[in-house]
Structures are given as structure tokens and as C-alpha cells.
Image (cartoon, grey):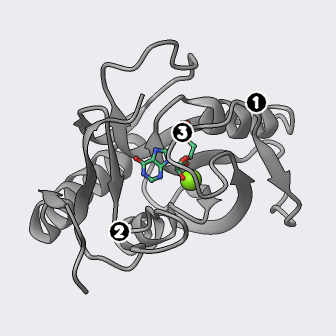
Amino acid sequence: MQLPNSQILISESDLQNRITSLAHEINQHYAQNAELIVVSVLKGSVFFMTDLCKQLQLDVEIGFLFLSSYQGKMSPQTKVQLFDLPLPDLKNRNLLIIEDIYDSGASLKYAYELCLAFQPASIKTCVLLAKQGKKNQAQVPLDYVGFHIPNHFVVGYGLDYQEKYRQLPYIAVLDNGSDE
Ligand code: IMP
Ligand code: MG
């Protein structure tokens, strides 16, 4: 597939190498074979979550949260919308929230606070990408970050522009300027 006006920011091999090292860090943090509930924020984090989980030597259970804040545009909307999906029982369990990107931070903060209300034993966050140089990003713990990236609109490896380009195995910049 050809992407108009785009450039590769993170290659497939760089993505996979970094995911291997993130999985290693996560494996080190929890006791061997500890139970971990992975909460994947749909749709963007699915590719990242599956590649990461394949390398976790833990007793993993997977749940999903379906949040939406962009609705096909390149500028974030401050309101985060939740579409109901059944989650595993989170009380007294170890949670790892997986998000594709920390942009305004509104989605991750929403997911974090929602999960916290279920009184988990522990809660950590893992984002593939964190945008730098943005104003007023929501304050939420970022425990595991794949890559810090400049403030550009990116697609691929789960991230979309108007629901397209998610299947690209790499991350590409779609625009040539800041998305603010
Ligand atoms: P937030 O602004 O941090 O709440 O990000 C909300 C959601 O917008 C993320 O989970 C992504 O799905 C999407 N998003 C944010 N930045 C980008 C981008 O550069 N490309 C594609 N999707 C993005
Ligand atoms: Mg998302």
C-alpha cells in the first residue's frame, strides 16, 4: 500500500526490537508466572498488545476498553467516549493498561481512572508512543513507553487516519508539520 506524503518514522524491525525489550522489562517487574490482566484500549493498541503479550512469561488475561476521542479527525476532541465492553473482574488483580499513543493523554487518563475505580491490586500503563512537545498533556503515570516521538500525526501498527493504515507494519508520519 502506498501512503501519500508520508515517511517512515519507526521501522518494523525497530518496533519489534523495542517490544522485545519492553516485554523483558515487564517480565522482570512481576514475579515469575504472576497473574496479569492486560487491558487493551481499542482499536489502536491491538497490534502492539498482541506482539507484546506473546513475549510475556506471565499468567496473562486480556480485556478490552473501547474508547474514542478523535472520530476520524486529526485534532483531538477533549471528550472521551466509552463504548461498553465486558472487562474481566479487576478487583485485587494486577493490571497493565496498553495504549497505542499518549497524545493529549485524555484517553489514557480516562482508562486509568476507570480501572482504578475497580480497586485493582496494582495498575501500570504501557504506551507504544508518547508525543513530546505538546501543551497541556493530561497527567497520568507512564510506566512503560516504547518510543518518545515528535508532535506529528502518525499512522501504522494500529494507528489510523480515518480508519485507514492500521495494518502497516511500521509507524509513518502522515503530515509534515505539528498536528496542533
Ligand atoms: P489522546 O489525545 O492521548 O487521548 O489520544 C487519543 C487517541 O487518539 C489515541 O489513543 C489514538 O488512538 C489517537 N491518536 C492520537 N494521536 C494520534 C496520531 O498521531 N495518529 C493516529 N491516532 C492518534
Ligand atoms: Mg487509541
User: Disc 1 vs disc 3: which is toward the camera?
Assistant: 3
Disc 3 marks a residue whose amino acid type is Ser
Say whether mark 2 is within 8 Å of ligand 1: no
Considering the image in quadrants, where does the N terminus appear?
bottom left
Residue hosting label 3: 75
Q: Secondary structure at mark 3?
A: loop
Residue furthest bottom in the image? 1
Quick check: 155 above or below 51? above
Q: Are marks 2 and 1 in contact (CB under 8 Å)?
A: no
The reply to whether residue 85 is visible in this rendering is yes
Horizontal side, residue 116 vs residue 167: left or right: right
Circle 3 crowding by C-alpha within 10 Å: few under 14, some 14–19, many from 20: few
Residue 64 % position (x, y): 70, 63
Look at discs 2 and 3 and give the one toward the viewer. 3
The amino acid on which the numbered mark 1 sits, given as a three-letter code, is: Glu
Q: Which residue is mark 1?
A: 113
User: Could you say where residue 157 lies in the image, as x and y percent from the top left?
Assistant: 35, 68
Q: Which mark is residue 157?
A: 2
Instruction: Decide which of tag 2 and tag 1 comes sooner along the chain.
Output: 1
User: Residue at image x 50%, y 47%?
Assistant: 74
Which percent across, then down, holds residue 178? 30, 32
Quick check: 72 above or below 92?
A: below
